[in-house]
Image (cartoon, grey):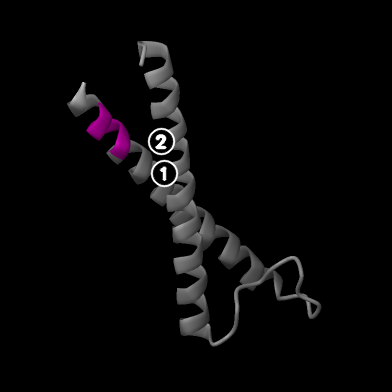
Amino acid sequence: MNRRNKRILERAGVGLFVMGAGLLARRATASTWQGVLDRPPPSDRDRNHPALREAMAWAVVSGVVVGLARLFARRGIMSRLSDEA
């Protein structure tokens, strides 16, 4: 395998790993939200329109958690790849 193809595969792998970390973080955050508040997190499909405070709290909490998960996943995998090189 030439160097260019290896690099493409590495980038695709990193992207998939980071995307998976984000999805897992969002599910974990939603599960925690439901466990703490005894109701699912607000979504666009809610017919009863959640309060603005609750919707904004969910947006902030989920955004921060998912963003941090993606950041740490990317850093972790990139440091591992650079150690192998």
Q: Where does the image place residue 78, in percent across and percent down from the top left?
A: 31, 32
The x and y percentages for residue 66 are 47, 53
Question: Vertically, is 23 above or below 57?
Answer: above
The residue where tag 1 is placed is 17
**Residue positioned 44% across, 57% down in the render:** 65
Q: Tag on residue 5?
A: none
Q: Is residue 35 left or right of residue 2?
A: right
79 inside magenta stretch? yes
What crowding class fits label 1: few (fewer than 14 Cα within 10 Å), some (14-19), or many (20 or more)? some
> Which residue: 57% across, 66% down?
57
Contact between labelled residues 2 and 1, with CB atoms less than 8 Å apart: yes
Q: Amino acid at mark 2?
A: Val
Asked where in the image residue 49 lies, by quadrant, the reply is bottom right
Left or right relative to 65: residue 46? right
Q: Residue at x 53, y 54 (%)?
A: 63
Q: In the rendering, at what x and y percent does residue 21 appear?
A: 42, 51
Check disc 2 and report its element: helix, strand or loop: helix
Q: Label 1 sits on what residue type?
A: Phe
Identify which residue is drawn at 54% across, 58% down: 60
Distance between mark 1 and mark 2 Cα atoms: 5 Å
Residue lying farthest to the bottom in this orientation: 38
**Residue farthest toward the left in the current orientation of the protein:** 83
Magenta stretch: includes residue 18 = no
Query: Whole-percent x and y of residue 8?
Result: 45, 22
Q: Which residue is mark 2?
A: 14
Highlighted magenta segment, given as a residue range: 77-81
In the image, residue 76 above or below residue 25: above
**Quarter of the image where one finds residue 38:** bottom right
Q: Is residue 75 above or below residue 29?
A: above
Q: Nearer the viewer, residue 55 or 44?
A: 44
